[in-house]
Amino acid sequence: MSTPLHLHEDRLFPSDAVQRAIARRLYAQVATLPIVSPHGHTDPSWFAGNAPFANATELLLVPDHYVFRMLYSQGVPLDALGIPRADGSRAQVDPREAWRVFASNFHLFRGTPSSMWLNHVFHDVFGLRTRLDATTSDAYYDRITEALQTPQFRPRALFERFNIELIATTESPLDPLEHHAAIRDSGWSGRVITAYRPDAVVDPEHEQFPHALQQFGELTGEDVHSWDGYLRAHRKRRAFFAAHGATSTDHGHPTAATANLSTDEVRRLFDKVVRGVATPADAELFRAQVLTEMAAMSLDDGLVMQIHPGCFRNHNAGLFERFGRDKGADIPLRTEYVHALKPLLDRFGNDPRLTLILFTLDESTYSRELAPLAGHYPSLFLGPAWWFHDAPEGMWRFREQTLASGGFYNTIGFNDDTRAFLSIPARHDVARRIDCAFLAKLVAEHRMDEDEAADVAVDLAYAAPKRAYRL
């Protein structure tokens, strides 16, 4: 007999009865607020073409590295799941068989954020009422795949059903943004914007850098092998992205290092970069200088700046060679911010025209560095718990460690930061529940009145991301 699937109405709320009652009341005021998703990685072609999703595997398994990294860690080859390889090919795997592998191993996700998100999707989006396992695999696959062929499950219909007010995708400076143009010209009311992610033309150690830099020059008509031409090319592409709705940039550097070199120094450094003779130290210094240049450009064009540092990306060299980037092998690094950001902050930290949103995978920096920095500089704000830490425990630790010196209003609400489209409502629901539970504790301890907590809950769920991302 199949085991029932049930989402408890008090999930993630405190076990203490007094706090739980307060959390329920707070949550009632934010549960149905529109979703603002100002940073993520969904595919804009979904909303441009509005074609049906192919099947359960292609929608829920293949794009979600949170899911297949766990399966890989337990010995399941990515080829067995139909994950595309770096060259665009993939193993000839029946998507139903890939789903059976996933279903048979669903117990691996017990207690993880992925199990919460997926069960939310199964229960609320597809109306499934039994748990996923080997015995229900085919029933799940058929129910989901059949639903996806109906008009109610097309991308735009789901966007509207989820009460999404806005989604931001993330594109390379080389992207022509034709999908965003198609969305804009279609007359559909859904708001899908882009964000400028220039890593491939900023990081000399990026495997695509030489070719990407050449394309960057061809696209902009600038001599990107000269420092001045390189900066002009960035300004042109940033303006192009802004014309397609972008309000932010995003930078995924190994560290938070910034620099403030003289013009002569940076030209000498850039010459080494374009000639391909930069050392690892040169590459780090160049990335650091470009972050400061991006901040300077933000003063001119108003784009909000995001930094996602402290990640050893594509740690599994063999997997990277075969399957490429973003396959679940990004590992947190110890990260320093106080000294790293000082060159940029010396130039722009006191300028309220700059909005700089900092993320971290090093939780030890929350109370020691990030919250004190954001609690002082008018340009700095803290991004929410990210990647390994966007779990209930990570969200709670984020609030505990940043409240004292950063408060709530130097944070920017929640980013789902996901490729898994259907998990977006689930992820926002988890964040809203955790924030309400955290606020309920403050109310129960008489550190905040309940009406104040309600204001904060609404701000974190809805107003803060709109304000921070200038939406």
Image (cartoon, rainbow, N blue to C red):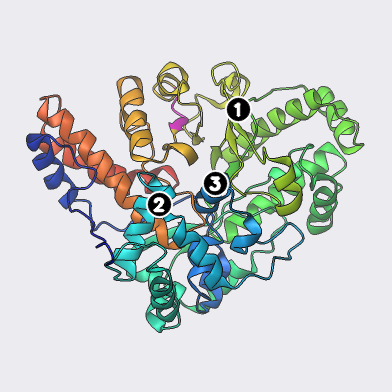
Magenta stretch secondary structure, dominant? loop
Residue 379: in magenta span: yes
Q: Judging from the image, what secondary structure is the residue with disc 2 in?
A: helix
Depth-wise, is mark 2 or mark 1 nearer the camera?
2
Report the amino acid beneath label 2. His
Q: Identify the residue shown where x is 71% and y is 51%.
A: 324
Marks 2 and 1, how far apart in space?
37 Å
User: Hey, which residue is sitting farthest bottom in the picture?
Assistant: 150
Tag 3 residue = 74
The quarter of the picture where the N terminus appears is: bottom left
Q: Tell me: residue 445, above or below residue 422.
A: above
**Residue 135 placement, left or right of 444:** right
Q: Quadrant of residue 224?
A: top right
At label 1, the amino acid type is Ala
- Binning the other alpha carbons within 10 Å of mark 3 as few (below 14), some (14 to 19) or many (20 upward) gives few
User: In the figure, 271 relative to 377: above or below?
Assistant: below
Q: Which mark is residue 107?
A: 2
The stretch of residues the image draws in magenta is 377-381
**Residue drawn at 51 percent across, 71 percent down:** 47
Q: Position of residue 283 (x, y in %)?
A: 78, 30
